[in-house]
Amino acid sequence: TPIYIEWLINVPILLTLAGRFALQRPMTEVTRPLVVTNLYIVLSWTAHFWPLKELRWASIIVSFLMYAWASVDMAIWVKNFRAETRHDMPARGIRSALAFGLIFTFFVYGMLYLAAHTGMVASNRELSGWIIMNVCAKLGMLIGFVGIRSSQFFDLLVDLLLNKSNPFERQRAVNNYYGEQEEEEEENALPFVQ
């Protein structure tokens, strides 16, 4: 039970990081796989408590179908992201890999769950597997975001050092990198008083 509670907290965070922040998808696009994933986590947990074997397996089958549905949605995130972004965007491949990495990780979770449910894996090994996979999933996400940020800064430095000849142009490039637009500066400027 503690593992399932931990997943209900951490899996939405991982999905939001991959979908919203790495792939820059709108929350409306991220919400469905996030909700479906949490529902199949709860449904797979309830399979432990059904008295009838048929109900347990029905819960497991529906959970795996929901996993497939959420995975397709996550693959669509990647497709939409790649269609909407420049080919030279920093860490474009790493961003896509984060979503596919989560799909793969959740598949491995499912295989361990199935192995434990059928008695192929002892409960102590199951718990060890969950802990190792949880740590690896979070470390993988962390490493991915470090790679994204490093790539962004590398591109900024190359742009500043090679493509900008004077300090004014460099400052403008830094401002653009951090999202400050010239139009916003003009709109927010104080009116000139004579």
Image (cartoon, rainbow, N blue to C red):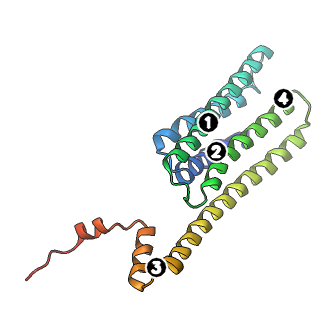
Looking at the rendered structure, the kind of residue marked 4 is: His
Q: Residue at x 42, y 85 (%)?
A: 166
Residue density around tag 4, few if under 14, some if 14–19, many if 20 or more, within 10 Å: some
Question: What is the three-letter code of the residue carrying label 3?
Answer: Lys
Residue identifier under label 2: 11
Residue 50: name its quadrant.
top right
Q: CA distance from mark 2 to mark 4?
A: 21 Å
Query: Label 2 near label 1: C-beta < 8 Å?
Result: yes
**Three-letter code for the amino acid on which mark 1 is drawn:** Asn
Going from N to C along the chain, the mark reached first, 1 or 2, is: 2
Q: Nearer the viewer, residue 51 or 190?
A: 190
| Figure check: 55 above or below 152 | above
- The Cα–Cα distance between marks 3 and 2, rounded to whole angstroms, is 43 Å
Decide which of tag 1 and tag 4 comes sooner along the chain: 1
Q: Earlier in the sequence, mark 1 or mark 3?
A: 1
Secondary structure under the numbered disc 3 in the rendered image: loop
Question: Closer to the N terminus: mark 2 or mark 4?
Answer: 2
**Disc number for residue 117:** 4
List x then y, in percent, for residue 193.
10, 80
If the image is split into quadrants, where does the C terminus sit?
bottom left
**Would you name the residue on which mark 3 appears?**
164
Identify the residue position indicated by label 1 in the image: 38
Q: CA distance from mark 1 to mark 4?
A: 19 Å
